[in-house]
Amino acid sequence: MIRYRGKKNVIDKVKELDAFPKVPEEYVDSTPVGGTFSIITFFIIVCLIYSEVTYFLDSNLVFKFMPDTDMDEKLRINIDITVSMPCSNLGADILDSTSQSVFGFGELQEEDTWFELSEEQQDAFEAVKHLNSYLREEYHSLWQLLWKKGHGSVRATIPPRKTKPNRKPDACRLHGVLTLNKVAGNFHITAGKSLHLPRGHIHLNMLFDDTPQNFSHRIHRLSFGSPANGIIYPLEGDEKITKDENMLYQYFIEVVPTDVDTTFESIKTFQYSVKELERPISHSHGSHGVPGIFFKYDMGAIKIKVYQERENLLQFMLRLFSIIGGIYVIVGFVNTLVLSLRTAFIKKAAPDVLNRCSEKPLQVNPLLVSSNLLVPDGPDLIRQ
């Protein structure tokens, strides 16, 4: 008995510390106003919970800038260009500041083709051209979607030609992958095959003057490193058409190393910005130079690291609970205010209605009702 009383005393002590007092059910008054506010509170809390969970799952993108110290890394360039000249009249070469032999970079494949596209090919190229142009122009408003949802430049993939024209090929498709040193360089396409010398190379077509040339071209692919989502390659889907002979096209490219670590991939790649310049070559008018297509690239000294950062789970739970509690308290205060105003209005306008609403049947506790304790008479008791 002593041990039981001790336990009972401890339980009573704990009950006295209850910070959440319970109101007996018979003292709870449910009203239509309170029910309406309860429904409104439920929907508000559900909407806010959905919004907070969505925000928590949608991580923040962080762009961190740091010096690029990995100088031994190789630079891979992906090329797919169509030039409006036969392959026999073109030469593609690359030179960098290390004066390394061009044979160590790889070799581009040459494929004779026709510069004029079929209707199906033209529709596909125009679609990719306009889409990539839109992405470049609206990148400031789409960059989060591109990085987080795994979108990037659309490759200008042209379907194969179903019917071949009844004429000789008048264009050359140059495509392949070159592995370069991570230094400044110059990739160029000019007239004539190149002749490699111990200290460089020359193009045989330079020995002839006044040779008509057409360097109209389409850039299906020009990127550095591995393709990555979220990165826009400005020159892909670009097209230059000219009727002038001996045109010079120059692209000045700034290559920036980029480390990507997102939900979709973790990769080391490169992105670039470009400036364009084109002019006709006419020695008689003082516009000197070599006709062709020149891509002059340089490496940036700053590396960009892109990664996703999420909020701490504990902070998320605390913010979620505070929102739920705050909505509950505020709506409860509004409910009390509305009920008070309604009661004051009814009391002033129609006091009889208030008296009828306040009258409630008295609920009698059956334990407090005295039972009939009269003892029946003897004969009746005998009969029972």
Image (cartoon, grey):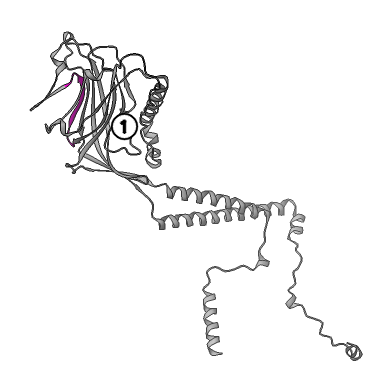
Residue 351 figure quarter: bottom right
- Give the residue at x 41% y 56%: 313
- Residue 326 on the magenta segment: no
Q: Is residue 75 visible?
A: yes
Q: Main secondary structure of the magenta part?
A: strand
161 w.r.t. 323: above or below: above
Rendering coords of residue 57 (x, y %): 43, 49
Q: What kind of element bears circle 1?
A: loop
Q: Is residue 259 visible?
A: no
Residue bearing mark 1: 233
Of residue 104 and residue 290, the one placed in the foreground of this image is: 104
205 w.r.t. 237: above or below: above
Rendering coords of residue 228 (x, y %): 32, 39
Rendering coords of residue 203 (x, y %): 15, 20
Quarter of the picture containing the N terminus is: bottom right
Rendering coords of residue 32 (x, y %): 68, 54
Q: Residues within 10 Å of mark 1 (few under 14, many from 20)?
A: many
Query: Which span is picked out in magenta?
Result: 181-193
- Give the residue at x 24% y 12%: 245
Q: Residue furthest top?
A: 284
Side of 57 relative to 183 (left or right): right
Side of 309 relative to 17 (left or right): left
Side of 334 relative to 168 (left or right): right
Of residue 69 and residue 163, the one placed in the foreground of this image is: 163
- Give the residue at x 33% y 33%: 232
Of residue 377 and residue 220, the one placed in the foreground of this image is: 220
Q: Inspect the image, locate mark 1, and give the three-letter code of the amino acid beneath it.
A: Tyr
Q: Residue furthest left?
A: 198
Of residue 183 and residue 325, the one placed in the foreground of this image is: 183
